[in-house]
Amino acid sequence: MPKSLRNWICVLFVTAGCGILICSAGAGSPNEPQNSPRPLEILDALWKALQDNYPMMEYAGAFEDSWYEEAKSKIEGMTDLDQALPVMDALVKRLNDYHTRLLWRGKPRLLTPSMSLGLVEERIAVLDRDSGTPVDPGDIVLTIDSSDAKAQFDLLYPEAFGATRYARNQDACRTLVARPEGSVVHLRLSNPMKGEYEVDLSCNMAPHFLRHPVLSTHLVEKDIGYIRILRWADFSPAEFDSQLQQFRNTNCIILDVRDNGGGSDNLAAQVIGRFINHKVVCSISFHRQPGTDQYRKTVEFAEPRGEWQYSGKTAVLTNEGCVSATEHFVSGMKEAGAILVGTPTSGACGWIRPIQLPGDVQLYCSRTFPLHGKVPSPLHGIEPDELVLPTLEALRTGRDEVLDKAIQALKAE
């Protein structure tokens, strides 16, 4: 089942302590009435909303009005919102903040085949796929619709969305095969065992987070437990406690939150509480006061919870799919002494505020600039103690290199 692809029908935006599920309203054209706002009117309102609400425009590189002027030069003369709104969408994406999005009725919905691609050893490779998809992890994608896959990636990467190069790699790879629902993408691939082969795949990827158990556990070795947490929702602290109980006497435990799309900060903090015997800081948030340059600081903690706390060594597996409440969790666990293994988390501002713009357009805008650990996490992510990148050999043999490195690091402590 794909682990790193987030091309969902529904886009999950998660604030600290509150999830907001925003669904596409359909793929049709808005066909705005005669009194609909002009494109430049929407652009002006969008830019003012960002200036008044986004916590730190300059940090993202938006100095003065240069981004606005660039978008305005492209939109001037346009009367069709279907042409103008993607230009405004591209402006918002320059913030590289997964919590900040522009939505409108009729926004195109692009899906992918049931697989995920990644940049591995400077080649475009299959990372994972759904059962029944006729490709295998480690297969190299040579061409996509008859065009060289790596050359297409190189063209897409400069405009790819993401705060880190790992997140941008992921977005560019997703974009390579993203098409309107039901479209067919033609791939030519190579595999050492199968040679070169071609497949046609339908773009119908559904939200994989709906098809997995939210909590799963097993022993990876005799004295090392493993708990996978898919999202910070749909389970209770008591349910987590029952899973943790089986590993109470193990020397080590691994918490896998790779591709955890967020949810409730409070739930994440309660899980942290089973691994600490003193209060730890998870997040420090600077809340911008709308329309001013003033900020209010809040500090979010995790406190010990339960009749006992796990006292063994702990590792947390991370990647660029760790967003929102998961960064809150990773930060708190790092403060608690856990080893972080994998690639950096995604990194963004937080606490979404919906802002209605003219017409049927909404801006979902971050309100806080957070610290996770000792450095700002927006545009940075939370870096692991042990960086692990995928290899073709491991993909082809089904070996989880991140998990293997975590086991090695725990044993070395």
Image (cartoon, grey):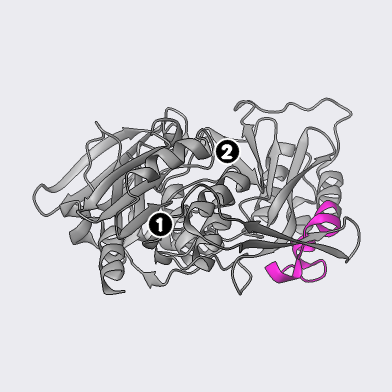
Count residues near mark 1 (Cα–Cα under 10 Å), then give few for <14, some for 14-19, many for 20+: some
Q: Residue at x 64, y 34 (%)?
A: 22
* Rendered view: 356 above or below 349: above
- Residue 144, image x and y in percent? 33, 47
- Residue 367, image x and y in percent? 76, 54
* Rendered view: 318 above or below 243: below
Q: Quadrant of residue 373?
A: bottom right
> Label 1 vs label 2: CA separation?
25 Å
The C terminus, quarter of image: bottom left
Foreground residue among 230 and 49: 230
Q: Residue at x 46, y 51 (%)?
A: 308
Task: In the rendered structure, find residue 152 and report the number of the disc placed on it.
Answer: 1
Determine whether, in the image, residue 408 is placed left or right of residue 158: left
Which amino acid lies under the numbered mark 1 shown in the image of this protein?
Gln
- Residue 69, image x and y in percent? 79, 62
Which amino acid lies under the numbered mark 2 shown in the image of this protein?
Val
Residue indicated by mark 2: 11
Determine whether, in the image, residue 8 is placed left or right of residue 37: left
Magenta segment: 49-70
